[in-house]
Image (cartoon, rainbow, N blue to C red):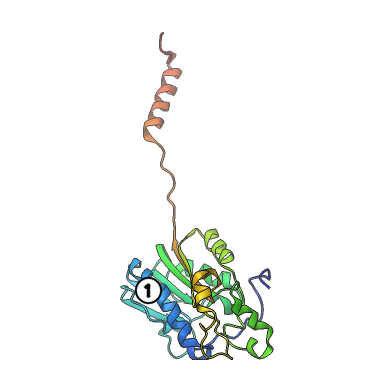
Amino acid sequence: MWLKPARIDNAPKAPKHWQEIPHGGWWRDALARALEPHWETLFGHYMLSLGPLSHTLPNSCRIREQYRVGPGTAAHVHANYNALPFSENTVDAVLMAHVLEYASDPHSILREVDRVLRADGHVLLALTNPWSPTTFARVWPAWRKSPLLNTRLFGPARVSDWLNLMHYEVIHQGYFAAGAPIPAINDPEKGWGWLMRQWPSLQAGYYMVARKREWPITPVRLGASNHQKQRIALGASGVSTRTSD
């Protein structure tokens, strides 16, 4: 299940709003609380929210110009995620809440985000945690059709590897939603909350905050270069560069 190719032909249908997800309000609030400390580290002029779940996620980001991109009536800009209508190096931050799990080619989305993102820009990702006990609910056929229970499963290590290959530095990683958002129960934290708060890696979702890095070419040490040129010139003129004892 976790070793399947990232690119597929038929991706699962993505939810259009949080209410389509079992305990969607609880899930949204848990993600908002997890990202709250990281909004103050973002700066710039333009931010993109990709996907309908990102559109309505509360945030206190100081970036004023925020645009909703994707399908649906709530979007400011209607576009495919792998063909964003923005110029290169123009966006300061991109938020993607549960976008990659429903994509037929998540690599192409990340490459497109990288194209429009400026150097030292940030990308914020939220995904379902495949190592959470919630994933065992997938064995029940009726629950498997529910959003977030029919998603594709990409573990943190795999997504981090994708970002590292694109020269992104994961500066923050954590987990959210200490519970089991199963449709048949009323309180997703009952029986699970204490356990998952003690072992956060068991929580139902995880998030990443990554920064785009563009490392400059290492400059030549001018002092060493000039010294080497001087030795070459002295050698060519027949003057010995050896020092006497």
Count of marks placed on residues? 1
Asked if residue 221 is positioned above or below residue 101 in the image, the reply reads above
Say left or right for 112 vs 223.
right
Residue at 32%, 73% (x, y): give it.
63
Tell me if residue 82 can be seen. no
Residue 226: x and y in percent read: 38, 29
> Which quadrant would the N terminus be assigned to in this image?
bottom right
> Which quadrant would the C terminus be assigned to in this image?
top left
Residue at 58%, 86% (x, y): give it.
182
Asked if residue 235 is positioned above or below residue 82 in the image, the reply reads above
Check disc 1 and report the residue beneath it: 36
Q: Could you say which is closer to the camera, residue 129 or residue 12?
A: 129
Q: Could you say which is closer to the camera, residue 30 or residue 195?
A: 195
Element assignment for label 1: helix
Residue 141: x and y in percent read: 68, 88
| Three-letter code for the amino acid on which mark 1 is drawn | Glu
Asked if residue 32 is positioned above or below residue 220 in the image, the reply reads below
